[in-house]
């Protein structure tokens, strides 16, 4: 009997040992599974980190590049707009004084027509420029001798210029119209014409009246220490007009060009009474 009991005890002990071993194996498997799961999570996090780092690196490169491209495009657009505005000239705007006008057409105002004729003669006979090298280029022109003499007056000026001046151009056109210059003081600087009282002309500051063909525009020292003077030959609107002049683009050269009331160099104009 004792032997049977001893065998049963050993048998139970064996079962308990196997159960303990199984439990220990189960716990070991759980631990291993956790470790494997943790490893996969770590791998995933590493992958996410790599993707995030790549995205961050990409943004560091592309965002500044896109900003630079955007700024360059804005600058290009701004330059195009400015160039477009500066080259824009009214083509069919009604004039406030002469009705509908055609760009480049000269008004019927007497001084405008005279300025245009003087310009045409100098362009055709003097190559657009008068100086000491072609002093007598207008000998065969249709301009009056008095006007030609005024155009040649630059040789007598106290400053010793040897090319046509803007004042002589305006005075020559005035002589063709009225038989006399615009003022009694022939050696005035252009800018001074807005300060010295003239017998037959009144100075009007811009924005105080509407510009008209035949007005004589006065420019300030932005166009040089002595200023500048020209004749209005066409008006497109209250803000846009054409002038004819001498000694603007180059020494002694006559030309016709567009201008605007908002030109900061423009102070105003002389108008015949």
Image (cartoon, grey):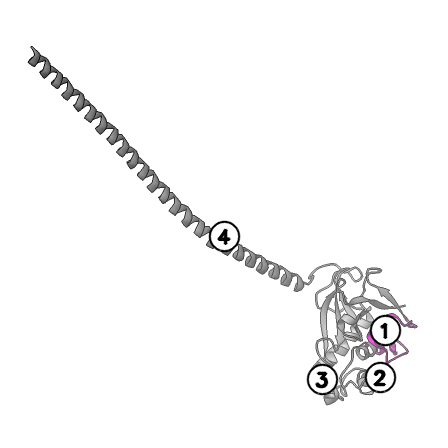
Viewer-proximal residue among 6 and 168: 6
Q: Residues within 10 Å of mark 3 (few under 14, many from 20)?
A: some
Q: What is the distance, in whole Å, between disc 3 and disc 1 at their CAs? A: 29 Å
The location of residue 199, given as percent across then percent down, is: 93, 72
Residues at marks 3 and 1 touching, judged by CB atoms closer than 8 Å: no
Q: If the image is split into quadrants, where does the N terminus sit?
A: top left
Q: Are marks 3 and 2 in contact (CB under 8 Å)?
A: no
Contact, CB < 8 Å: mark 4 with mark 3?
Answer: no
Q: How many marks?
A: 4
Disc 4 packing (10 Å; few <14; some 14–19; many ≥20): few
Residue placed under numbered mark 4 in the picture: 63
Reading the image, the residue beneath label 2 is 146
Q: CA distance from mark 4 to mark 1?
A: 58 Å
Q: Nearer the N terminus, badge 3 or badge 1?
A: 3
Q: Are marks 4 and 1 in contact (CB under 8 Å)?
A: no
Neighbor class of circle 2 (other Cα within 10 Å; few <14, some 14-19, many 20+) is some
Distance from disc 3 to disc 2, alpha carbons, whole Å, reads 18 Å
In 3D space, how far apart are the residues under numbered discs 2 and 1 (Cα atoms)?
24 Å
* Between marks 3 and 1 in the image, the one whose residue lies nearer the viewer: 1
Q: Nearer the viewer, residue 226 or 59?
A: 59
Q: CA distance from mark 4 to mark 3?
A: 61 Å
Which segment is the magenta one?
173-200
Q: Nearer the viewer, residue 268 or 19?
A: 19
Q: Nearer the viewer, mark 4 or mark 2?
A: 4
């Amino acid at each position: 009997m004792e032997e049977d009991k001893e065998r049963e005890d050993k048998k139970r002990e064996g079962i308990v040992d196997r159960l303990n071993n199984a439990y220990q194996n189960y716990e070991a498997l759980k631990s291993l599974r956790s470790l494997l799961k943790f490893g996969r999570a770590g791998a995933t996090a590493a992958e996410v980190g790599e993707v995030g780092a790549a995205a961050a690196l990409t943004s560091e490169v592309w965002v500044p590049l896109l900003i630079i491209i955007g700024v360059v495009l804005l600058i290009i657009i701004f330059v195009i707009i400015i160039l477009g505005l500066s080259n824009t000239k009214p083509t069919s705007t009604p004039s406030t004084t002469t009705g509908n006008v055609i760009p480049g057409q000269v008004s019927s105002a007497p001084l405008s027509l005279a300025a245009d004729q003087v310009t045409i003669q100098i362009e055709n006979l003097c190559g657009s420029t008068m100086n000491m090298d072609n002093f007598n280029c207008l000998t065969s022109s249709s301009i009056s001798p008095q006007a030609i003499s005024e155009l040649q007056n630059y040789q007598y000026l106290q400053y010793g210029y040897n090319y046509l001046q803007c004042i002589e151009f305006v005075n020559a056109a005035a002589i063709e119209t009225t038989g006399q210059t615009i003022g009694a003081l022939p050696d005035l600087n252009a800018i001074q014409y807005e300060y010295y009282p003239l017998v037959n002309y009144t100075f009007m500051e811009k924005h105080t009246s509407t510009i008209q063909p035949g007005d004589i525009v006065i420019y300030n020292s932005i166009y040089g220490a002595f200023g500048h003077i020209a004749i209005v030959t066409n008006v497109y609107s209250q803000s846009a007009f054409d002038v004819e002049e001498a000694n603007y683009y180059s020494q002694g050269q006559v030309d016709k060009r567009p201008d605007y009331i908002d030109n900061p160099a423009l102070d105003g104009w002389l108008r015949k009474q």
